[in-house]
Amino acid sequence: MSENKKTLGQFLLDEREKRGMTQEKMAESLEMSRPDYCLVEKDKRPVGFDVQNRIANLFNRSPAYIRRLIKNSKERQ
């Protein structure tokens, strides 16, 4: 998939697998529950600005990049 059309869920899954992290560990890192994280990874749960910023900080990406992933997620629904 093109990096320009990647969704937030796809990005999180790719980054989690690249780092060998479990969903539980990712959820902890983002200060959310594992069930909520699982829904985000499946593009089935929106995230607020606080979580968007945590994702941006965790993966050293700009908040604008994270918002673009969220926009792609919405376009695919």
Image (cartoon, rainbow, N blue to C red):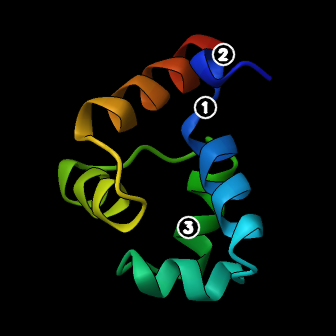
Graded by Cα atoms within 10 Å as few (under 14), some (14 to 19) or many (20 or more), the crowding at tag 2 reads few
Of pointers 2 and 3, the one earlier in the residue sequence: 3
What residue would you read off at disc 2?
76
Classify residue 36 as left or right of residue 18: left
What residue would you read off at disc 1?
7
Whether residue 25 can be seen here: yes
Q: Are marks 2 and 3 in contact (CB under 8 Å)?
A: no
What number is the disc on residue 56?
Answer: none
What residue would you read off at disc 3?
37
Question: Relative to 42, is 77 above or below?
Answer: above
Whether residue 77 can be seen here: no
Label 3: state its secondary structure: helix
Horizontal and vertical percent position of residue 4: 58, 16
Cα gap from disc 1 to disc 3, whole angstroms:
14 Å
Q: Are marks 2 and 1 in contact (CB under 8 Å)?
A: yes
Label 1: state its secondary structure: loop
Q: Which sits in the foreground, 39 or 26?
A: 26
Amino acid tagged 1: Thr
Of pointers 1 and 3, the one earlier in the residue sequence: 1
Q: Quadrant of residue 12?
A: bottom right
Q: Quadrant of residue 57?
A: bottom left
Q: Are marks 1 and 3 in contact (CB under 8 Å)?
A: no
Horizontal and vertical percent position of residue 34: 58, 80
Graded by Cα atoms within 10 Å as few (under 14), some (14 to 19) or many (20 or more), the crowding at tag 1 reads many
Question: Relative to 39, is 31 above or below?
Answer: below
Amino acid tagged 3: Tyr
Amino acid tagged 2: Arg
Residue appearing at x 80%, y 23% in the figure: 1
For the residues carrying marks 1 and 3, which lies nearer the camera in this image? 1
